[in-house]
Image (cartoon, helix red, strand yellow):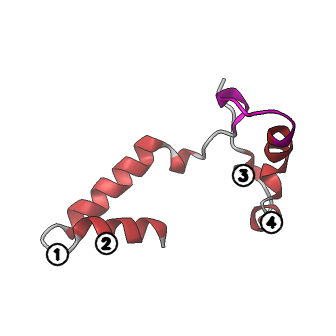
Amino acid sequence: MTRASPEQSASWLSRLSFQWVQPTLERGVKAPLDVESLLPLNDSESPAACDATFRARLAAHQGRGRPVLRSMAELHW
């Protein structure tokens, strides 16, 4: 069974203040975190989804100056 990211069901205020990540931070203060104790990624942040989005933007910028830089900037801003 796949766990859902608590960020997906968090309120806008919780997202703004990062309260949805608080339980994980508290566990990390008490003991080192291992892979199983980390929060799952949102579906849109999976490596496959990020790769597909980046490749699509990179293809759109081919032939223009600095296609990698332009693509990365669009992904993060």
**SS under mark 2:** helix
**Disc 1 residue type?**
Arg
Which residue is situated farthest in the top direction here?
Answer: 1
Expressed as whole percent of the image width and height from the top left, the position of residue 73 reads 39, 71
Q: Quadrant of residue 3?
A: top right
Q: Which of the marked residues, 1 or 2, is nearer the chain's N terminus?
A: 1
In space, the residues marked 4 and 2 are separated at their CA atoms by: 30 Å
Residue behind mark 4: 17
Mark drawn on residue 7: 3
Residue 35 in the magenta stretch? The answer is yes
**SS under mark 4:** helix
**Disc 2 residue type?**
Arg
Q: Which of the marked residues, 3 or 2, is nearer the chain's N terminus?
A: 3
Mark drawn on residue 64: 1
**SS under mark 1:** loop
**Residue drawn at 77 percent across, 60 percent down:** 18
Question: Quick check: marks 1 and 4 in contact, CB under 8 Å?
Answer: no
In space, the residues marked 1 and 2 are separated at their CA atoms by: 9 Å
In space, the residues marked 3 and 4 are separated at their CA atoms by: 11 Å
Which residue is situated farthest in the bottom direction here?
Answer: 65
**Of the residues tagged 3 and 2, which is closer to the observer?**
2
**Disc 3 residue type?**
Glu
Residue 75 in the magenta stretch? The answer is no
Q: Which of the marked residues, 3 or 1, is nearer the chain's N terminus?
A: 3
